[in-house]
Image: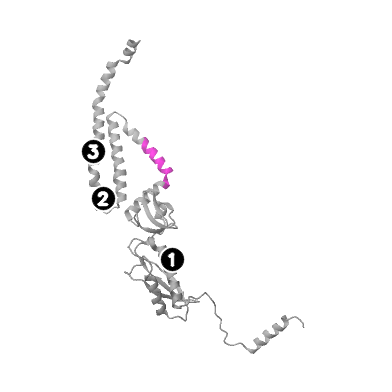
Amino acid sequence: MLDQILQDLDLTAMATKAIEHIPAVLAGLVILFGLWALFSLTRKPAKRALGRAGLAPALIGLLVDSLLRYTVLAFAVVMALDQFGVNVGAALAGLGIAGVAIGFAAQDSVANVISGFLIFLDKPFQSGDWVDVVDHQGRVVEITLRSTRIRTPSNTYVVIPNKMIIDQVLVNHSKHGETRLNIPIGIAYKEYIPQAREVLLQAINGVDHVLQDPPPTVVVMECGDSSINLEMRPWIGDANHGAPVTAAVVEAAKLALDEAGIEIPFPHLQLFVDEVKRPVWEGLTALNRQGRPNA
């Protein structure tokens, strides 16, 4: 039985076929390893060249370590399969049709990826910046091709699709370094503005994280209904300190004004009656009498 099986297998023919395919196998392996070696040799120079072009480090990593790597690998696999006699054209045509179908099914994902490229190229923010976007405020901790990740002041982790960021107004508090806070406060009309300004500046300068260069200022914004409305303008070096510094400045300003005897008025409405005609008084008196119970 064993002899019959060996005869059916025709080992000689199989060995001959295997030997015939050795050159193709070797050629495919040479192509695979050759293109991979080429990628390894050009990887660092490509990163340096893109860095000199001003691209963000995260985008350089995505372009070289992801896009270029998989492109080279796919090209090497296609060339290796061609050496083995595989109909690469038909396979690529099938992949192209499948790619179109997948593209229609993943339109939002493709839009997010394109938006991610625009963010990397336009650089409206980078990792570490403090931003306001899509009703969220926080520090950017990571930027990917699909989404941007933000850590909020309450230590929550927010993932925002890049397409939404591109379509919204974005405020970057860290783009130019120092950030100015605008904190309103009111004083009574009877108070002396220069004295109130001096008291407030002393209070502001005693708060942690407030910069001395540029120095804080206190300006008059308007004459309001109940008060002279001032605005305290301290500067901070890190936008992350915005909320705690604002709270500390308001508290310090209130205590300093109280200690100096400067009034912070409640909202109120004051009426002045210049002259009341005699018929009006007579009419009010008559109404008052009509409203009294009979004696």
Q: Which amino acid does label 3 sit on?
A: Ala
Q: What residue type is labelled 1?
A: Ala
Residue 129 place in picture, x, y as percent: 35, 57
Disc 1 or disc 2, which is closer to the eye?
1
Near mark 1 (Cα within 10 A), the count class, few <14, some 14-19 or many ≥20, is few
Q: Residue at the front extreme?
A: 259
Image position of 226 (left or right of 133): right
Which residue position holds label 1? 247
Q: Measured along the vertical axis of the image, is residue 237 above or below residue 282? A: above
Distance between the alpha carbons at the discs numbered 3 and 1: 58 Å
Mark earlier in primary sequence (3, 1):
3
Q: Measured along the vertical axis of the image, is residue 168 above or below residue 28? A: below
104 is within the stretch colored magenta: yes
Residues 167 and 231: in front is: 231
Q: Please report the residue visible at 28 percent of the width from the left and 32 percent of the height from the top.
A: 80
Which residue position holds label 3? 37
- Magenta segment, which residues? 94-108
Residue 172 can be seen, yes or no: no
* Coloration of the structure image: one colour
Magenta segment, prevailing SS (helix, strand or loop): helix
Which residue position holds label 2? 50
Q: Please report the residue visible at 31 percent of the width from the left and 50 percent of the height from the top.
A: 59
Helix, strand or loop for disc 1: helix
